[in-house]
Amino acid sequence: MAFYSRVSGSVGMITLQNPPVNALSAPVRQGIVDTIHRALSEPEVKSVVICGQNGTFCGGADIKEFGANMSGPPLVPMIHLIEAAAKPVVAAIEGIALGGGLELALGCHYRVANSKARLGLPEVTLGLLPGAGGTQRLPRLIGVPAALELITTGRHVTAAEALQLGIIDEVTDHNAVDAAVKLAQSVAGKPLDARRISTYPCPRPPDSDVVFEKVMQEVRRHARGAIAPGTCVQAVRAAVALPYAKGMEREKELFATLFTSGQARALQYYFFAQRAIGRWSTPSGARWDTSKPRPVRKAAVIGLGTMGRGITVSLAQAGLSVVAVETQEKQLLAAKQAVTGMLERGAKRRGAPLVLDQIKYGRSVQAAADVDLVIEAVFEDMALKRSIFQQLSRLCKPGTLLCTNTSGLDIDELASQTQSPELVVGMHFFAPAHVMKLLEVVHGPRSSPEALATAMQLGKKMGKVSVAVGNCRCFVGNRMLRPYVMQAYFLLEEGATPEQVDQVLEEFGFPMGVFKMSDLSGLDVAWRMRKAEGLVLPASAGESARIREGSRYSPLGDLICEQGRFGQKTGRGWYQYDKPGGRVAKPDPWLHGFLEEYRTRHGLAARRIDHQEVLERCLYALINEGFQILQDGIAAGPEDIDVIYVLGYGWPRHRGGPMFFAGQVGLDKVLERLEHYHQVHPDVPALKPCSLLRRLAASGSPPISRWREILQKPRSQL
Ligand code: 3H9
């Protein structure tokens, strides 16, 4: 709702009240309309201030309403009512003015903001465009190029930048409401014609067709299949090409096409998914969300390879004292240099203080004796990790939390090396660890809720999105990746090329297909893990290298590693690069010849494989594993898996995540296609539909919001 009061007798004050962000729900819109009418009708009131309760102006339209039948007064006429008012209306912006919130402010005659406020039109990130006049008013106010940039990226700007751009009239370090009241009093009775943005001509850039075409191309290149950014450009173009009223009609039409699109639904689902994860414990796990995290002031990182360096940077930037340990002298020097460089660049970029002094370097694990928490980040080698955990358990002060940065090793095995297995937790960071937002926090069967809560809290402090997952081989993200990669290998065996598979996946929206991605990450890491698991057989194994106890396995990844082709770092992998470390992937005739020779050797006939099969086999195998993970209780819900995939694996956000995507395709359809592929490839267990998928499909494919409830039922019923 919005409540009304009077300040100093002559200023009508409208306060939006809808915690936590004063979103413009139906009651709030109704409240604004009612109170504006009241302020305009009271003769003593000479001007009006609109502000938000609790230091927050407004977070925009109420996204929760989007899925339901909309009621209450629409936003556009409400904002017109404000703009057309005969008394000056001033927006007092504290905290945030985002989306419809900024559009409301643009309908006001003046805007005052607190210096800490952030403003923006982030609708594009929800698969929408600013649909309450933002695409028509903002370019009129600040010009087309600046408006296009803000609207197509959804970027938030500070109050200082907003002032510079001309979005607001005044910035104050003090209370914006007091400043707005002062301004409202000073402008009472003054003419308003020049303050109504909708009446401004829209400045037409010279060569406007060329400008828009260029922006459209740029936006399409970055959008990877997302439709909202290009539609935003079309709406701003209408501001230039059409008079205001017609431009508003165009904005409405374009908004309507986006509003009902699957992409908008996916992006809005994802918005809430990211906020919802962490609220539930996994079905197999201890409750951690009600436990109090321990304070962590000093942490140690053991092993300063690429991951250890990124983790050290992230911890220091989060304000912790860090002991960074590397036993190899040369590696330690290189790490120190690299960490210093990363911190210096980070401080410059973020305008934050340099925190070099918070890190102490050491060559012995002994240096971790007095820390509150250790993150071991050595090589992915169980024997090495085991011995480090034994040492840590002996030397660390009682109660120290011992975490391992592993992408898939058994947390319980490490816990069993220590005297306090309840204090052992997995923290799976993603490379580069100081940049990537995702953190899988892995609870072993013996990890205590408190230890888990501490790791989750620390992740948050480090600016990560922490997702709690259960302990199993490769956890959630990498476990799902395996069947996906394996399908891609099978497709090569059957006649596809890496280029073809990658093209299909990139068209779907991944920034890189599976083969380019593997070349970038380095093929040797997964190879080493497969070797440790005994999956890699010698070349002499012949046909038994391909069929393991009745299940098909593709040794292609192992074979190219045996050739020393580890991807970008060696200049050769699934593609060729101009030099070791090169980044531009080029098709490699050697690889094509190698595939042909491999097929001949194994009597495999190459066939033409269409795009649909490539996409379905790769994605549905991955999704099927996701259902298995839910069924096993390794992830708390589909949202957790989706967030992991979007943040850690490049799954296109506008497709919501793999589990949401499955729901959008239709669970019965996914099931039917998996059944089909499994019939054709009965020796591929990853294509055998998981029983949870069958059960959900049989119960009428309930919406994803209901899966969690179904998952709560006893495992035996799934
Ligand atoms: C729009 O305006 C369309 C118009 O152009 C045209 C219409 C015709 N609605 O993120 P947080 C909830 S589209 C409903 O954890 P923070 C959020 O779910 C809208 N709920 O906090 C969470 O709930 P819970 C354009 C909303 O401090 C709680 O608030 N606006 C909305 O890290 C706290 O959120 C946007 O895109 C909303 N609009 O960040 C802004 N916003 O506690 C979207 C938030 O139950 N919002 N909630 O989990 C944001 O970017 C961030 O939430 C914000 C606060 C920066 C505001």
Image (tube, rainbow, N blue to C red):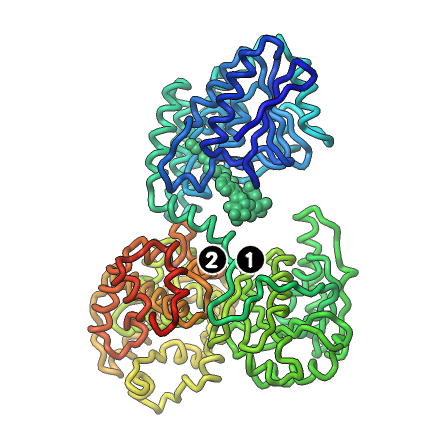
Give coordinates of residue 610: x percent, y percent.
23, 61
Q: Which mark is residue 185?
A: none
Q: Amino acid at mark 2?
A: Val
Horizontal side, residue 612 vs residue 245: left or right: left
Residue 532 visible, this angle: yes
Judge by depth and name the residue closer to the eye, 439 or 708: 708
Residue 66 falls in which quadrant of the image?
top left
Residue 146 visible, this angle: no
Give coordinates of residue 305: x percent, y percent.
63, 71
Give coordinates of residue 477: x percent, y percent.
46, 67
Are circles 1 and 2 on residues that touch, CB within 8 Å?
yes
Residue 213 falls in which quadrant of the image?
top left
Q: Residues within 10 Å of mark 1 (few under 14, many from 20)?
A: many
Horizontal side, residue 153 vs residue 260: left or right: right
Report the Cα–Cα distance between label 1 and label 2. Answer: 9 Å
Quick one: label 1 or label 2, which is nearer the N terminus?
A: 1
Kindly identify the residue that appears in the image at 70 percent across and 51 percent down. Answer: 347
Q: Amino acid at mark 1?
A: Val
Numbered disc 2: secondary structure = helix
Horizontal side, residue 356 vs residue 126: left or right: right
Above/below status of 430 relative to 253:
below
Q: Which residue is mark 1?
A: 465
Q: Which residue is mark 2?
A: 643
